[in-house]
Amino acid sequence: MLYPSKLIEDAVNEISKLPGIGKKTALRLALHLLKQEESTTDKLSTALVNLRKESKYCKICHIISDSEDCTCESARKDASILCVVEDTPDVIAIQNTAQFSGYFHVLGGIISPMEGIGPGELNIQSLLDRVKKSSGLIKEVILALSPTMEGDTTSFYIAKKLKPFSIKITTIARGIPIGGELEYTDEITLGRSIVQRLIYDTGND
């Protein structure tokens, strides 16, 4: 792709490094910013620099936060339930369902030998310490990890480590999405839906 200036080319090359953005989309974004007020670009640049330099991780739950104490301990939530997720976007997704009232623990990834990520690179020990320090307050740990081989491996490893604490260990249900059609559903998902079938509720009739 030919560019009218080196400045635009440099901007496109940097923007296109972002996930899901190709060269054409990057070019549109660069040209869009070029047409805006200079203050708009300045605000965007400042926000990105601050995001990179000032973002921290909560020392308790490891969620991305403005400080190392994200108030996760003082928030009014159900302290008996702890939901373990891979990263902060998973926290946001679960919170948006408005169906979970407990606390979160972010692992910062999943076990992946192919990528050189082992248990020691994840926030697993802090999870175990957190359960231990709760002195029995935490009654259930939900393993809300992606249904992949790596995700299942991580869940299995954590479940084994949590076993001595004699707490309830659960995992998120896996099945057919709302609005999905059976014929287009992969066999593994469909099989799990059959195995994890629920009682059909017909109400109080």
Image (cartoon, rainbow, N blue to C red):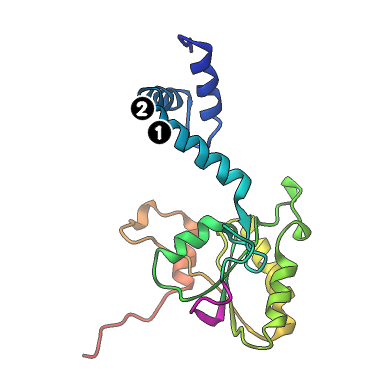
Q: Secondary structure at mark 1?
A: helix
The residues bearing labels 1 and 2 have C-alpha atoms spaced at a distance of: 6 Å
- Which sits in the foreground, 122 or 146? 122
Tag 1: amino acid = Thr
Residue 85, compared with residue 163, is above or below; it is above
Q: Nearer the viewer, residue 141 or 199?
A: 141
In the image, residue 185 above or below residue 144: above
| Residue 112 picture location, percent across and down | 70, 52
Name the residue located 78 percent from the left edge and 59 percent from the top edge: 120
Instruction: Give residue 96's quadrant in the image.
Output: bottom left
Residue at the limit of the structure toward the front, as seen here: 39
Q: Which residue is situated farthest in the left direction here?
A: 205
Horizontal placement of 114 versus 192: left or right?
right
What's drawn in magenta, residue-wise? 72-81
Quarter occupied by residue 165? bottom right
Percent x, y for residue 114?
73, 46
Amino acid carrying mark 2 in the image: Gln
73 in magenta: yes
Query: Within the image, what quadrant is residue 80 found in?
Result: bottom right
Left/right of residue 149 with respect to residue 133 in the rendered view: left
Crowding around mark 2 (Cα neighbors within 10 Å: few <14, some 14 to 19, many 20+) is few
Question: Which element type, helix, strand or loop, lies under badge 2?
Answer: loop
Characterize the magenta stretch by its predominant secondary structure. Answer: loop
* Residue indicated by mark 1: 40
Q: Kindly identify which numbered label has been placed on residue 177.
A: none
Q: Which mark is residue 36?
A: 2
Is residue 112 rendered to the left or right of residue 25? Answer: right
Disc 1 to disc 2: CB gap under 8 Å: yes
The crowding category of the residue bearing disc 1, from other C-alpha atoms within 10 Å (few below 14, some 14 to 19, many at least 20), is few
Q: Quadrant of the C terminus?
A: bottom left
Q: How far from the left and from the top, in percent, is residue 183?
A: 36, 54
Q: Is residue 43 above or below residue 120?
A: above
